[in-house]
Image (cartoon, coloured by chain):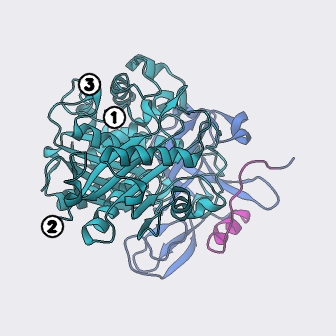
Amino acid sequence: MTYDKPVPAIDAESEPYWSGAREGRLMIQRCGRTGRCFLYSRRLAPGADGTDIQWIEAKGTGTVYSFTVCHAPAGPAFRSETPYVVACVELDEGARIVSNLVTDDPEAVRIGQRVEAFFDRVSEDLTIPKFRPAR
Amino acid sequence: MSRSPVIVGAADAPTHERGRALPGATVLSIQRNAADEALAQAGLTMRDVDGLAVAGMWGMPGPGAMQPVLLTEYLGLEWPRYLDGTNIGGAAFVLHAGRAAEAIRSGQADVVLIVYGSLQKSQAARALGGRPAMFSNQWDIPAGLPLPVGAYAMAAQRHAHVFGSTRETLAEIAVATRAWAALNPAAAFREPLTVDDVLGARTIASPLGRYDCCLVTDGGGAVVMTTEERARDLRTPPVHVLGHGASASHTSIAHMPDMAKLEAAEQSSRLAYAMAGRRPAEIDLAMLYDSFTITVLMTLEALGICGYGEGREFVRGGRTGPGGSFPVNTNGGGLSYCHPGMYGLFTIIEASRQLWGLAGERQVDGVRTAICHGTGGVLSSGATLILSTEKG
């Protein structure tokens, strides 16, 4: 079965995130000067003038910074999954990632809730890091 | 001789059948007709125009990538000397007006036309879910975040968590805005709306329901700006542009610095207030881009009209509606009047009409100073304009 949802247009600057995901590793970026972590390349790390930015592996645990339960799908490929949760997760390292929070009980999701990453291999080429409530 | 910038004309495109453009309209003719009407209001013609600003989603991919050039051709302008096609989302036109004010002040242009048009409803062109998952959208789009509503929903959720706003808070805004629309013959939705209607409507992306979301309509408009000096010979009393500002922060909602605060609006309005020499307490009318009810709540707080976290109390009891003590979005807003995709220009059109005393049944008494604020993207960019019947 082919994967019919939108796929990321992976570029040279995001490639370490997606190749890490294929290997089951959640990759984020870290400013060498401030230690602040973030995700998706920028010339300057947030709040610093440093360009010393490295990729590091995150633990994969964090809290829900915000979320929405989608009752109207973002296109036909998501229709069968409504209601589904898209969350903005703040990793314990500090970086924020938007992804799915996969749960049987969308109405129970709360800001501040602990979550953990898992790796959803949706096709041969693409593994999407997603989150589920922490055990 | 005063080159102080003023607005002398404003027009919006007529629509029918819940926001559909009139038969035979093209996305270009909508803009030409609105421009002609706005120029005629001032007693000017297209021949007087030497500056042009435009933004929109039309003609892309294709000549729409150079909208100022295409409209120069279509409108028949002769060698415009000021061109602006800056696109920062729906806030663009508010930024255009600020830039045009400086072009007029400095002598780069004498008469600037700002135009907008869209046929997104009749052409079913609003491609939700069809946006490419590029750059910082590589995360939210594959996750199925409906854009823009899902991003605004996340901000609403965060605002509720941090400041205690509720679905009822947001419903108050939808209801007050609809009550204004009932007084605007041009509004697409004028039937009464209650808080219970809003709360009972289907959820789109929690906590936002159907009536928390702006309309999808066609439409367009035009605004004409010139110098105070030139305006003395024109038909319309001048609306003075006292201050302006713009800023931006992020493309993906993941990178909004603080999801409970619309800091782009705080930044842009700080610039505008400083230039205008005005304080929030001196504002009589606020025209705020209401892409969603939460946008209004967050904008009121970020503009300092109330403090952060005070919006919940501020909007209670219909304060922003007809007869309330602080009028907001008197045209019925993007929620009930029209929302052709990039709404910012309509904040300026309505503020100008209120300042001219031409707002008909919805005219607010004693409006001397108005603030217009546009928000673009997913709470990504902000542009503020402070307008007044009085100079300085």
The reply to whether residue A32 is visible in this rendering is: yes
Residue range of the region highlighted in magenta in the rendering = A3-23
Q: In the picture, residue B74 is in which quadrant?
A: bottom right
In this figure, which residue is indicated by the disc labeled 2? B1
Most foreground residue, B177 or A18: B177
In the displayed structure, would residue A5 be above or below residue B172?
below
x then y, percent, for residue B166: 36, 31
Q: Is residue A21 magenta?
A: yes
Label 2 sits on what residue type?
A: Met
The reply to whether residue A91 is visible in this rendering is: no
Most foreground residue, A30 or B112: B112
x then y, percent, for residue B287: 31, 41
Q: Residues within 10 Å of mark 3 (few under 14, many from 20)?
A: many
In this figure, which residue is indicated by the disc labeled 3? B322
In the displayed structure, would residue B334 be above or below residue B345?
above
In this figure, which residue is indicated by the disc labeled 1? B165
Q: Residues within 10 Å of mark 1 (few under 14, many from 20)?
A: many
